[in-house]
Image (cartoon, rainbow, N blue to C red):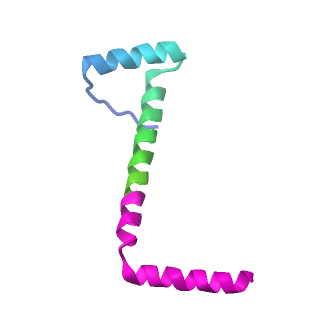
Amino acid sequence: MSDFTISLPSSLLRLLEEKAIEMGVDKNILIEKALNNYLDELNRNEYIKSFKRMRNDKDLLAISEEGMDDYARNII
């Protein structure tokens, strides 16, 4: 594990302290979970954007449709 020093607004630090006490965990645990959740959300948003871009790609749509035709023939 590595150390990392940051500055946060006092109001956010108060909320962090209150929630840590309420949950009975260290502040760093809450920060770690929050950061992991946020980074996961960023990744999900990137996937969504890429899928939205791909839905307009005619070549990719044709390949997908061909694949579905093959799949349908194989299951019948």
Q: Position of residue 14 (x, y in %)?
A: 34, 14
Residue 75 found in image quarter? bottom right
Q: Residue at x 45, y 47 (%)?
A: 40
Q: Which residues are magenta?
A: 47-76
Name the quadrant of the C terminus: bottom right
Residue 4 lies, with reference to residue 57, above or below; the image says: above
Work out whether residue 47 or residue 5 is closer to the camera in this orientation and state it: 47
Residue 54 lies, with reference to residue 58, above or below; the image says: above
Residue 34 lies, with reference to residue 18, above or below; the image says: below
Q: Position of residue 48 (x, y in %)?
A: 41, 58
Residue located farthest toward the right when viewing the structure as drawn: 76
Count numbered badges in the picture. Answer: 0
Q: Is residue 66 magenta?
A: yes
Instruction: Say whether residue 65 is left or right of residue 56.
Output: right
Q: Position of residue 32 (x, y in %)?
A: 45, 34
Q: Residue at x 38, y 33 (%)?
A: 3
Q: Residue at x 66, y 82 (%)?
A: 72
Residue 42 lies, with reference to residue 2, above or below; the image says: below
Residue 68 found in image quarter? bottom right
Dominant SS type (magenta): helix
Q: Position of residue 66 (x, y in %)?
A: 54, 86
Q: Residue at x 36, y 77 (%)?
A: 57
Residue 28 found in image quarter? top left
